Amino acid sequence: MTDSANLTWRPEINPWLIAAAMILPTFMVALDTSVANVALPYIAGSLSSSVDEATWVLTSYLVANAIILPISGWLSQVLGRKRFLIISMVIFTFASFLSGAAVNLSMLIIARVIQGASGGALLPISQAVLLESFPQEKRGEAMAIYALGVIVAPVIGPTMGGWITDSYSWRWVFYINLPVCIFAILLTRLFIQDPPHMRGRIPKAVDYIGFALMAVGLSALQVMLDRGERADWFAANWVWLAAIGSAVCLVGFVIRELSCRAPIVELRVLTDRNFAVGFVLAIVYGFILYGTLVMLPLFLEDLMGYTALNTGLAITPRGIGALISVTLAGRYLKKIDGRIVLVGGFTLLATALFFLSRIDLQISIFSVVWPNMLMGFAVGTVFVIFTTLTVSTLPNEMIGTATGLYNLMRGMGGSVGIAVLTTFLSRNAQLHQAAMVSHFTPYTSAFQQTLGKITQLICFRGYPAGAREKAYLGIYRTLVAQSTVCAFLDNWRMLAYLALSCIPVALLFKKARHGKSSL
């Protein structure tokens, strides 16, 4: 079949049926990145381990996910896309069952590694299938469907995980995957077809050296980002070793792939201008997306005293906003220049973050709900448009490699964002506390008046013994809470400025060209 036929190929099945088949695995894989977070204390208690040890349940999933993402395009070429999808879904389903049935922490971690590897393959391949199944002018709508899984699932994950764990058992956090995945396998067998450029291809030789360099480099980097903050970063020798080892392996990997005749990851895809711009934006977008998903629950639970359920209810409007925007964003590209929509999306995102940077401990839940909904609307719009523009100028045979690298960069951006924001939170809280203490000493009249009022209040409530010491403790707790609030506000302002910095980068995209659709 000619190259021209490859470019114009469309599946015999209605693409909306293909979209229905692909949204299920995408949603489940994205959900599993966050659904187990709230269940960690229950997992640790059930399997007789510490909470710190149980965090490997999350880390192992992310590491395996990162390793498989960039080579998913190569694996689909070797095995065939449809066969690779089905194999990955079967493995993901089996790993989900093993995770739920784990009798000890080691078994659970091994199962999560398998689950992360198989799930990491599903995300980019599902995206590639959607992009190739729809014509150019319909790709925005295809990415809107994909965004439902990638954006909405992590938002509702903690709430769903908390409800399942409280109502049933943490094991059902994993068992719930089974019926959904089995149904997705059946739909894939019925509706998915391999495109012409993947039929009858001779598998390339395996670049074992390149794969080893990539696996070690990404594993070391992911572990360092995920656990470095607990070890006070470079105060620990293992963090230095992980950073150096990761840098050496990844540089070696790039050199190897650029010089190898049969690279396992085709890095030359970065010579495409739109993909290079999207590659950079994916890192920053992941930083903002996952960073805000971590910061807001911490603020609501640790400082505002919200329960897990109330926190979930406060964050859920973000998913609602994203749901509204992704249903509209796919249609924007037909009528409006996508770059203009991106400018508006990043401006809305920065606006929502600036509003969050003005909240305090006296706020009502509404003060969190509406900026959250605005943020969800913005991230949904941005995701659909810039994902579509990123691959708009690539030939179909390059889309599999491109989606793997794109998803990797978004995930790594999220890991970097979480690591940076949690570190800044603890460090800036200490700096703000030191600054506040210098203006609030026992020798100032304001301090003496406050101390006297609190002491009288404690005595009035019938606890005169040690009232003064309790008053000091109350003042200190207020000081810590206020300094921590200031640190959260610093992080949200930083994220807002980061969103604004994406605007000039987004303008570097070439405008997508649309042809006539037969749909």
Image: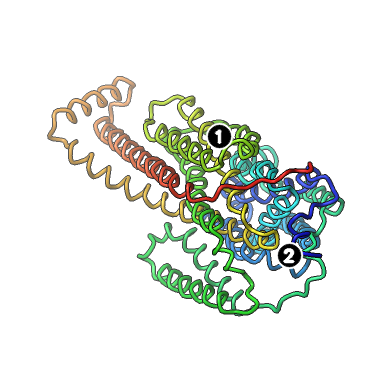
The percent coordinates of residue 294 (x first, y second) are: 49, 45
Q: Position of residue 101 (x, y in %)?
A: 73, 55
**Residue 518: where, in percent of width, then height?**
79, 43
Residue 224, compared with residue 515, is above or below; it is below
Residue 377 numbered tag: 1
**Residue at figure coordinates x 51%, y 68% from the top left:** 220
| Extreme residue toward the top, this view | 460
Hey, what amino acid is under mark 2? Ser
- Camera-side residue of 287 and 138: 138
Q: Residue at x 58, y 55 (%)?
A: 58
Q: Quadrant of the C terminus?
A: top right
Residue 419 placement, left or right of 513: left
Q: Residues within 10 Å of mark 1 (few under 14, many from 20)?
A: many
Compared to residue 310, the image places residue 490 above or below, namely below
Which color mode does the image show?
rainbow
Mark 1 vs mark 2, CA separation in Å: 33 Å
The circle drawn on residue 76 is 2
Sequence-earlier tag: 1 or 2? 2
Does 268 sit above or below residue 500?
A: below
Residue drawn at the location 78% of the way across and 71% of the way down: 201
* 452 w.r.t. 302: above or below: above
| Residue type, mark 1 in image | Phe
Circle 2 crowding by C-alpha within 10 Å: few under 14, some 14–19, many from 20: many
